Every structure is written in structure tokens, then in C-alpha cells.
Image: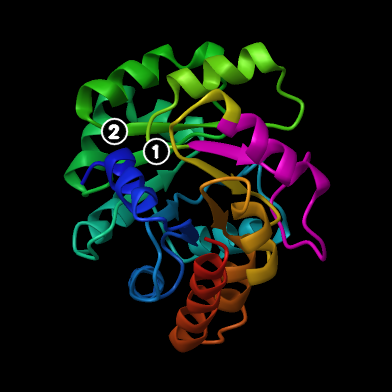
Amino acid sequence: MNLESHLRARRATGAKLLVPYVTGGLGDWVEVVRAAAAAGADAVEVGIPFSDPVMDGPTIQEASQRALAAGATPSGILAAARDLDIGIPLVAMAYYNTIHHAGHERFATELVDAGIDGAIVPDLPLDELDGWGDAADAAGVETVLLAAPTTPDDRLRAICERARGFVYGVSLLGVTGERERLAAQAETMGRRCKAMTDRPVLIGVGISTPEQAATAAGVADGVIVGSALMRRVLEDQGIDAVHAFVAELRKALDGAT
């Protein structure tokens, strides 16, 4: 499934886009992905656990550490992903060390073989994208690029032009994690990115509640929600709680259209 085409088609219907994040290799993570899809996700981001996740806050770090302690590996996660037939795209989130260790072409091929349509590499800047970006493009993996609140307009334009799948607008300076209030920069990022590109623009980092999701999506095409969902997983609230939370996000976004 083509990630960008799918998101564009959903957007064309008037829908706001919802992409939950799930840490691969943690417990019944495959069932968490299925629950998110069943509750109305438009795509699911699957995190490949890494020992030094520089972009991630305490919740995702804990999820990654638990997964690694339980024996999670990139190859094992991708093997399990092959059995996911959920009718929406999957996007892998992997730090560059994981990709470099496997090799660009090999990792891109493994993603395709696992049925994964896109990749987010948060520690690989635009200026250093060529090796991985070329291999991903050749394999048909769409590399999502991130833009921060401090990104100047000329660089933001270049990021939007080179991005594939969607543009990931980071709502604040800092790591992932739940916040009591939506960052002031979230709406600004949405407007800035939308002014630069027709490619789908999703806002992520710190989106914690259905209300925050609706507000952020009001000036963008949708949102990415990770820590708030993974907290429920870490607290062993169960698959029903995951489904209920994603359904609440979906309802709020549908009200924002």
C-alpha cells in the first residue's frame, strides 16, 4: 500500500488523519496495532526499539527498554509485521544506527518484505539523507521527514519537497511525552508546513488527549499520538483500553473536520 496515496485519499474525503505509535516487540504489540487499526487509525507507526532513543521521552524509552529486555530485535519485529493484514499502511520508526548496521539496501528490502510502506528516521537530517533516501526510494519505501519549530523557511521548504508519505511537524522543542497543554508551536507548525506543501502534514510530539489532537489537526491534516497510547500499554490496561483511546481520538478528529 502506498502511504502518501492512502493518506491523500483519506484527506480528500474530508477526514483528519490519525497515526498512532506502537513500540514493536513489546508484549502483544501486534494486537495493539490491530486494535488501533480497528478503532479508526489511518496508518500505524511501529517503533523499532533502540538503546539510545534520543528523540524519545520517558514513556517511549521505557517501552523500548522493556521490549529490548524481552529480546526484541529488528528482524523479529519485521517478521511479525508480515502477518499484519490491517488494511492501512505501516510506517517503521527506526534510529539510523539500526539502518546503518543492516545496510541501506538490505534494510529497505526487509521493510518492503514485511509489508511496511514508510520509514521515519528521526536522527538522520536532510543533509545526510542521500544514502538511505536513495535506497528507500528505489525499494518503494517512503521516508517521512521531520520539521522542528526552529526550522527556517528555506530549510522547511526543502524538507517538504524531499519528504515522502507525509511531513512530520514536531510540535515543540524537546522529547516525546504527554503534556497537559498543547504546545503553542503546534498550530504554528501546522500552518507553516501547510503553506509549504500539498503533501499531508501531521503534527506529533506531545499530542496527549483527544482535545489536543482536534486542535492540532485543525491547522494540519492530522496527528501522530505515541506516549499517551503507550502509557496505557505499559500500565497493562489491556487491548480494550487501547481500542477505546484510539476511538476517542478518531471521534475528536472527526468532529474537527
Q: Which residue is painted at 55% across and 38% down in the image? A: 168
Q: CA distance from mark 2 to mark 1?
A: 7 Å
What's under tag 1, amino acid-wise? Ala
Q: Where is residue 5 shown, x and y percent of the image?
A: 28, 40
Callout 2, which amino acid?
Answer: Val
Relative to 27, say whether 175 is above or below: above
**Image quadrant assignment for residue 119:** top left
Which is more toward the observer, 59 or 158? Answer: 158
Q: Is residue 170 visible?
A: yes
Task: Give left or right: position of 179 versus 75.
Answer: right
The picture places residue 233, in percent across and down from the top left corner, at 55, 76
Q: Residue drawn 39% across and 70% down?
A: 40
Residue 147 showing in the rendered view? no
Residue placed under numbered mark 2 in the picture? 141
Residue 2 lies, with reference to residue 178, above or below; the image says above
* Foreground pick, 7 / 36: 7
Query: Crowding at label 1, few (<14), some or many (≥20) Cα neighbours within 10 Å?
Result: many
The answer to whether the residues at label 2 and label 1 have Cβ atoms under 8 Å apart is yes
Give the magenta-colored segment's residue range: 167-194
Residue to which mark 1 is pinned:
119
Magenta-colored stretch includes residue 185: yes
Please give the name of the residue rendered at 59% of the width and 53% of the height, measured from the top-left corner. Answer: 217
